[in-house]
Image: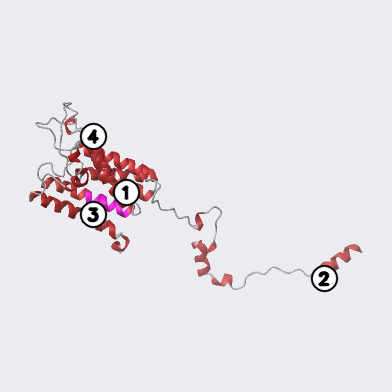
């Protein structure tokens, strides 16, 4: 019964995405993507191909494992609760967040130095999905979608700290390898998409007849129906309105005239 109510795409798309991520991770370990090949390199033309490839590439096993579960969960929520716009959100978010990362100047906010980095990983997409689902539920003000927003906030609320450089919160012996730029770009993209698509693909709220003002139907009155079922004898002979006799009425008029 549960699987009948779940959209097949909600299960299929996360499975395909995880398959692509792990396939590319295997290719990396076989030497197909060495160095910065396939990564986003901000403001450099050769880094543009990373807009498409970077979310599929990961630095190590911990990196891809850390991105796999939230990617699968958030993609499931996107395609299950926003089926009419899910593909557009995912594809536009993928390209837009990648381009935004590429356009952000690679400046180390702590040292102020210009630092070119090779940015890979699906965390930017994870942030895009999380922020879209959270803010879309708020902007649409739909109880079902608000519930999903609260669940995302509950399990992934700590993501908010990832949009800041790790050096802001702790002293590191060497520069952090976590790309806060991709997190920031993903969160900005998710919020913008939630605003732009807030009225697109929205299911019309069904209004039942009993929700209209001054509506009453005895067939919907359970207490009344229960009484009818338990006391059928009360309805065997219904009282009849006495019909007027016009001749009796005329006799009364004659008597008054006398």
Which residue, given by chain and number where applicable, does mark 3 sit on? Answer: 14
The kind of secondary structure element at disc 3 is: helix
Start-end of magenta stretch: 71-80
Residue farthest to the front, as pictured: 45
Measured as percent of width and height from the top left, residue 94 is found at: 26, 46
Whether the residues at callouts 2 and 4 have beta carbons within 8 Å, the answer is no
How many angstroms separate mark 2 from mark 3 (CA)? 86 Å
The residue tagged with tag 4: helix, strand or loop? loop
| Label 1 close to label 3 by CB (< 8 Å) | no
Task: Write down the residue under mark 1.
Answer: 148
Q: Are marks 2 and 3 in contact (CB under 8 Å)?
A: no
Q: Which residue in the protein does label 4 denote? A: 104
Which of the two residues, 79 or 50, is positioned nearer the viewer here?
A: 50
Label 1 vs 4, first from the N-terminus: 4
How far, Cα to Cα, is label 1 from label 3? 18 Å
Q: Along the polypeptide, which appears first: circle 2 or circle 4?
A: 4
Please name which of the two marks, 1 or 3, marks the residue nearer to the observer.
Answer: 3
At mark 1, the secondary structure is: helix
| Mark 4 neighbour density, 10 Å: few (under 14) some (14–19) many (20 or more) | some
Quadrant in which the C terminus appears: bottom right
Task: State left or right for residue 113 relative to residue 204.
Answer: left
- Residue 160 at least partly seen: no
Q: For mark 2, what is the residue?
A: 247
User: Disc 4 or disc 3, which is closer to the eye?
Assistant: 4
Q: Earlier in the sequence, mark 1 or mark 3?
A: 3
């Amino acid at each position: 019964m549960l699987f009948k109510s779940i959209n097949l795409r909600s299960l299929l798309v996360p499975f395909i995405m995880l398959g692509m991520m792990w396939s590319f991770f295997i290719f990396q370990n076989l030497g197909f993507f060495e160095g910065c090949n396939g990564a986003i390199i901000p403001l450099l033309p050769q880094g543009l191909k990373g807009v498409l490839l970077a979310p599929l590439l990961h630095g190590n096993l911990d990196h891809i494992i850390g991105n796999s579960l939230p990617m699968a969960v958030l993609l499931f929520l996107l395609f299950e609760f926003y089926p009419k716009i899910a593909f557009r959100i995912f594809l536009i978010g993928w390209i837009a967040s990648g381009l935004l990362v590429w356009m952000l100047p690679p400046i180390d906010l702590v040292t102020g130095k210009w630092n070119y980095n090779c940015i890979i990983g699906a965390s930017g997409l994870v942030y895009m999905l999380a922020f879209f689902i959270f803010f879309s539920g708020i902007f649409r003000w739909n109880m079902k979608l608000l519930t999903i927003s609260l669940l995302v906030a509950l399990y992934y609320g700590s993501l908010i700290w990832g949009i800041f450089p790790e050096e802001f919160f702790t002293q590191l012996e060497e520069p952090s390898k976590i790309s806060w730029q991709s997190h920031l770009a993903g969160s900005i993209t998710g919020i913008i998409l939630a605003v732009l698509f807030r009225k697109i693909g929205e299911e019309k709220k069904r209004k039942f007849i009993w929700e209209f003002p001054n509506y009453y139907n005895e067939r919907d009155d359970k207490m009344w129906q229960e009484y009818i079922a338990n006391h059928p004898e009360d309805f065997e002979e219904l009282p009849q309105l006495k019909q007027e006799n016009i001749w009796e009425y005329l006799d009364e008029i004659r008597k008054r005239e006398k």
